[in-house]
Amino acid sequence: MKERGEKITMVTAYDYPMALLADRAGVDMILVGDSVGMVVLGYENPVPVTVDDIIHHTRPVVRGAKRPLIVADMPFMTYHVSREQTVTNAARLIQEGGADAVKLEGGREVAHTVKALVEVGIPVQAHIGLMPQRASVGGSFKVQGRDAATAEAIIGDALALDEAGAFSVVLEFVTAEAAEVITEKVGIPTIGIGSGPMCDGQVLVLHDILGVYDRAPPFARPYANLNKVVLEALSAYRDDVRSAKYPGEKYTVHMDADEAEKLKKKRG
Ligand code: KIV
């Protein structure tokens, strides 16, 4: 698609119904991201998410989405301790979860990790720029590559990851200028999130697209307002139950009249 100049669409999903709909909508790639920790499990950051959590959420996504490429996130500290542990964890996401590929955060310092996984046959998507797993040491949620020196560093990271064998790289909250250079320089597709229009594709967190929460990152365009839709539906349901409007005749099933009569007689 990169060679043909076709933009690649990617979205996160964490369950069967949303995977089914993402597939039906024609999305190219689904990410079972560790953002599941924040948008589904209620954590403040992705740190508590485990390999078991990602496997649990990848399985229904695989059952729901047949066409898209499915990428499973490697959670915090699951690819740092040793090569053996890294390969074991990544293999579980592929073998037990059913993912097609894994994603991990980091620049040139994880290039050897990417290489080790690719060497044993596990496709890897890299992730640079803003790295939510490192937010506690990397400071606040801010745009990466604002000046020439930091932009150069990110470009160097992208080249190292391409060289290491990653099949794609996510650029999170990187200035559009730096993202454009990376997209030109690397052979692999760049998938942007808050990184401008020049990337080969875009990814967004599903809950941001759907407007599930009141708040979203500044770069995330909401395409729906599920918050409002769901609140209205649940409030209407609550009101109807309280006022006995629901279920009403329309949603009620009766016995045949003669059977009802028999029952009545039996019960006196
Ligand atoms: O976990 C996630 O959803 C991600 C995206 C923000 C790219 O890593």
Image (tube, rainbow, N blue to C red):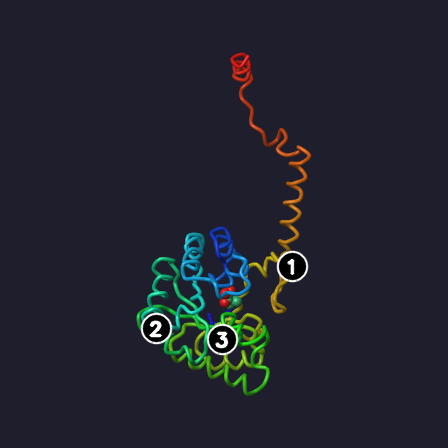
Q: Are marks 1 and 3 in contact (CB under 8 Å)?
A: no
* Nearest-to-viewer mark from 2 and 3: 2
Give the numbered dot on residue 128: 3
Quadrant of the image occupied by residue 193: bottom right
Quadrant of the image occupied by residue 108: bottom left
Coordinates of residue 182 in the picture (x, y in percent): 50, 80
Coordinates of residue 67 in the picture (x, y in percent): 43, 58
Q: Residues within 10 Å of mark 1 (few under 14, many from 20)?
A: few
Q: Residues within 10 Å of mark 3 (few under 14, many from 20)?
A: many
In screen coordinates, is 45 left or right of 61? right
Question: Does the rendering let one see residue 19?
Answer: yes
Q: Decide which of tag 1 and tag 2 comes sooner along the chain.
A: 2
Q: Decide which of tag 2 and tag 3 comes sooner along the chain.
A: 2
Disc 1/disc 2 C-alpha distance (Å): 40 Å
Could you tell me the amino acid type at mark 3?
A: Ile
- Circle 2 residue: 82
Q: Residues within 10 Å of mark 2 (few under 14, many from 20)?
A: few
Coordinates of residue 57 in the picture (x, y in percent): 45, 56
Q: Note whether 24 is above or below 265 in the view shown.
A: below
- Circle 1 residue: 214
Quadrant of the image occupied by residue 124: bottom left
Which residue does the image show at 46% across and 72% down from the upper left? 105
Q: Note whether 59 is above or below 147 in the view shown.
A: above
Q: Are marks 1 and 2 in contact (CB under 8 Å)?
A: no
Q: Identify the secondary structure beneath mark 2.
A: loop
Coordinates of residue 266 in the picture (x, y in percent): 51, 13
In this orientation, which residue lies closer to the viewer: 137 or 123? 137
Q: Identify the secondary structure beneath mark 1.
A: loop
Q: Quadrant of the C terminus?
A: top right
